[in-house]
Image (cartoon, grey):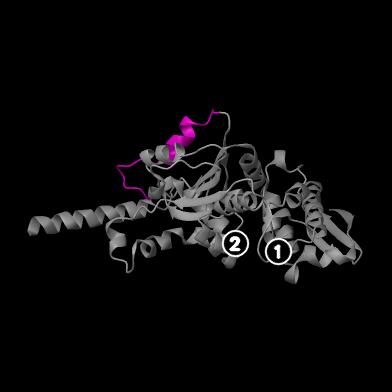
């Protein structure tokens, strides 16, 4: 068994090890090494291949700690999951790319190299598609980019929209006026705005009309000049709706379209406009397409495991719902026949 010593300033060691040494325990488990705190550094024991792998991760964790970030087991698992071609990349590049700050002063930055590519595509293209599973930061990073450009005066309006696919009969049973009925579908967008801008600033701009949060149907017939538009949950747009949205873009505008193609809630006879658009527009200059993966999930590690489990099983989670819908339709038809 080989052994190496890594010099680490004492003020960073506790952060790298984590609460109850949870970060190091995770690293030991995944690499088959033994890692000890020597006070003035870290000693790692194991075979040559395991030592090299553990050292790369520890070097990156030290960079994260030096930047004042809290090191978590999520960092450990992400660094270990990187494909070989990305293992040589400098994690410091991620930490130095601050998109904006929240109202509370917390920096918002890409946390994975996939998210870094996504942010760069948004910066460099008029239209960007962000596609990936839940928890990859598609919507949140798009909102952060939009708000930052709005604050800098690079656009005069923010328009945030998503399809309310149940905006017909089912919504009619909810209490309140139309706005009250559609607000639950737009709540994730409101939550991000409150966190980044603050409730007072958001409300003030809403009243001025410089920020608009609305269902996709409200976009029809409009031309959106000098605006930053975010279309969320785009996997639930029909092909006609997607075409309608794309043809709204005007001069000085920038748009980000986000969605998860494994969570399409459209009726079986309707095809996703997001899927069609990414195929039709993939070779057009000025349009960026970023496909995030389960490696880019930045929610609780359990979310990443859930995504992986569904991918391994080859199911999207919609199949059982589809069968349920079929049973309901069959039962309703049976009732009609009896009546």
Relative image position of residue 224 (x, y in whole percent): 49, 42
Relative image position of residue 165 (x, y in whole percent): 36, 52
Answer whether labels 1 and 2 touch (C-beta < 8 Å): no
Q: Residue under circle 2?
A: 300
Left or right of 17 on screen, residue 148: left
Task: Return the mark for residue 105.
Answer: 1
Q: Which residues are magenta?
A: 265-284
For label 2, the SS is: loop
Q: Most extreme residue toward the left, as rendered?
A: 339
Q: Is residue 303 visible?
A: yes
Relative image position of residue 123 (x, y in whole percent): 64, 41
Q: Tag 1: Cα neighbours inside 10 Å, few (<14), some, or many (≥20)?
A: few
Kindly report the distance in space between the C-alpha atoms of the residues bearing marks 1 and 2: 22 Å
The residue closer to the viewer here, 20 or 146, is 146
Q: Nearer the viewer, mark 1 or mark 2?
A: 1
- Residue at 46% from the left image edge and 49% from the top image edge: 313
* Magenta span contains residue 155: no
């Amino acid at each position: 068994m080989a052994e190496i010593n890594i010099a680490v300033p004492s003020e960073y060691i506790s952060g790298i090890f984590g609460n109850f040494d949870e970060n190091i325990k995770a690293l030991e488990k995944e690499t088959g090494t033994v890692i000890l705190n020597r006070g003035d550094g870290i000693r790692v024991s194991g075979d040559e291949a395991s030592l090299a792998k553990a050292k790369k991760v520890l070097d990156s964790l030290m960079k994260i700690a030096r930047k004042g970030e809290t090191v978590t087991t999520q960092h450990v698992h992400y660094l270990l999951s990187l494909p070989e071609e990305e293992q040589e990349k400098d994690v410091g590049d991620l930490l130095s790319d601050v998109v904006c700050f929240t109202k509370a002063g917390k920096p918002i930055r890409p946390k994975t190299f996939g998210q870094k590519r996504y942010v760069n595509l948004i910066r460099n293209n008029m239209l960007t598609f962000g596609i990936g599973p839940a928890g990859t930061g598609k919507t949140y990073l798009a909102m952060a980019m939009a708000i930052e450009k709005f604050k800098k005066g690079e656009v005069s309006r923010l328009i945030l929209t998503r399809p309310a696919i149940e905006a017909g009969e089912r919504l009619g049973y909810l209490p309140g006026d139309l706005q009250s009925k559609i607000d639950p579908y737009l709540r994730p967008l409101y939550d991000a705005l409150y966190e980044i801008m603050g409730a007072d600033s958001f409300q003030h701009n809403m009243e001025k009309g410089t920020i608009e949060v609305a269902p996709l149907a409200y976009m029809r017939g409009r031309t959106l000049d000098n605006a930053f538009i975010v279309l969320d949950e785009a996997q639930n747009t029909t092909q006609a709706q997607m075409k309608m949205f794309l043809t709204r873009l005007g001069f000085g505008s920038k748009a980000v379209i986000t969605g998860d193609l494994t969570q399409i809630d459209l009726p079986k006879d309707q095809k996703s406009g997001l899927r069609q658009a990414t195929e039709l527009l993939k070779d057009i200059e000025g349009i960026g397409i970023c496909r995030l993966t389960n490696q880019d999930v930045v929610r609780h590690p359990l979310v990443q495991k859930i995504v992986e489990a569904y991918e391994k099983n080859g199911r999207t989670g919609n199949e059982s719902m589809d069968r349920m819908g079929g049973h309901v339709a069959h039962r309703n038809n049976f009732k009609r026949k009896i009546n």
